[in-house]
Image: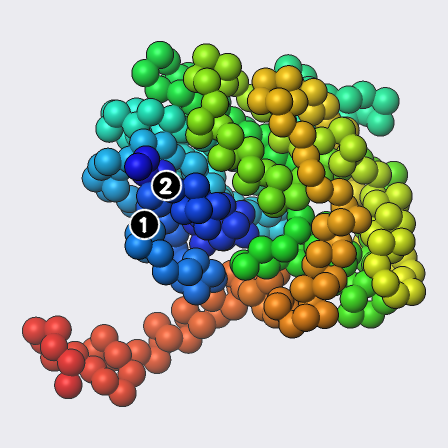
Amino acid sequence: MKTVLVTGAGGYIGSVLVPKLLARGYRVKALDRFFFGTDKLAAHPQLQLIREDSRRVAPDVLTGVNAVIDLVAISNDPSGEMFGAATYEINHVSRVRMAQMAKKAGVDRYILPSSCSLYGFVDANVIVDELSATNPLSTYAKANELAELGVLPLADEGFTVVVMRQATVYGYSPRMRFDLAINGMTLGAWKNGVIPLMKDGTQWRPMVHVQDTTDVMLLLLEADANQINGQILNVGSNRNNYQLGPLGDEIANALPKEVTIQWYGDPDHRSYRVSFDKIEAVLGWSAQWTAARGALEIYEALEAGHISSMEQTITLNWYRELMKWHKIVREAELYGGMFDIQDSTGDSR
């Protein structure tokens, strides 16, 4: 039985990936700060929860580990801009360090989930692939690129390294996020009958369902090392390259209610259309989900009460909430507690 270390295991993608790994017969070490709670991962005899910061994790966490899927990240552009230093420390430095420790520990395989946002702004007539120049515009994208540049040179015959440049992820997850494009559109449609769209709707975005991208991670754990070692793979599908305006229309038409489009904000200058031919050729894989199917999945989960809109489902809002309560608690506590305090030996009174 192989053991996989998943960092960021309690997050949006991790909480979908970990149950799949367990169902496939892997042991899983799930490392996370668990800002969103440990309840997103159900107890399992082959699951070990490790509450730790990726910047401080000790090398012994890799004992007995066969592969690492290094999901940990400050996970979107607004959060990356607000917590710039931490984004570089976590998304870049800690992941390069993890790859270095993994190689030294004799781990066989290291998978880095990165982002297609590295392509930044691309002319509408251009379709970028893995050999195209990158143009990261945000702290999040820049930190991901630095991570890629740090881990790929570690690849050799004994250590397989592969980078996944994921399209914008969407779909249902136990750690639900409504700050992702399709998810947020669907929430607006369900709640108010309105899909919010950032102007001007002509910008291109590649999309990938969370089930599809986690399926790719499973394939990469077992793929022939000679096919993937040292490679960058765009993860998504040509069918799921969308302009935001037509994407809004597709979602509106997929849902069982009357929905209108509401435009907001200044025009978003990030636009990139991506080729996914390589992953289909290398892995023989193709995406199974479309935006319409994913939106309907979320809509039905909302209708059934399986998920709801709350502070936790908007990543930056939740980070701000944690920072607020951290300050309140630190200012209120004394002698290691509130009503229960500790004596000089650390024992509670």
* Dot placed on the residue nearer the N-terminal end, 1 or 2: 2
Name the residue tied to disc 2: 26
Per the image, the residue denoted by label 1 is 46
Q: Is residue 54 above or below residue 35?
A: above
* Residue at x 59% of width, y 38% of height: 213
Percent of width and height locating residue 215: 56, 37
Q: CA distance from mark 1 to mark 2?
A: 7 Å
The reply to whether residue 348 is visible in this rendering is yes
Q: Quadrant of residue 128?
A: top right
Locate the N terminus by quadrant: top left
Front-most of residues 20 and 136 = 20
**Amino acid identity at mark 1:** Gln
Q: Residue at x 30, y 78 (%)?
A: 333
Q: Residue furthest left?
A: 345
Q: Horizontal placement of 322 versus 5: left or right?
A: right
Kind of residue at disc 2: Tyr
* Left or right for 183, reference 107: right
From the top left corner, tell me how far across and down residue 114 is, in percent.
Answer: 55, 33
Q: Residue at x 76, y 46 (%)?
A: 291
Residue at the image position 45 percent from the left and 72 percent from the top: 325
Task: Provide the secondary structure element on which disc 1 rests.
Answer: loop
Task: Pick the quarter of the image with the C terminus.
Answer: bottom left
Q: Give the image location of residue 9, x and y in percent.
A: 43, 49
Where residue 99 sits, quadrant-wise, is top left
31 versus 237 height, above or below: below
Q: Is residue 134 left or right of residue 125?
A: left
In the rendered structure, the answer to whether residue 289 lies left or right of residue 255 reads: left
Q: Are marks 1 and 2 in contact (CB under 8 Å)?
A: yes
Describe the element under mark 2 as helix, strand or loop: loop
Residue 4 in percent (x, y) is at 36, 38
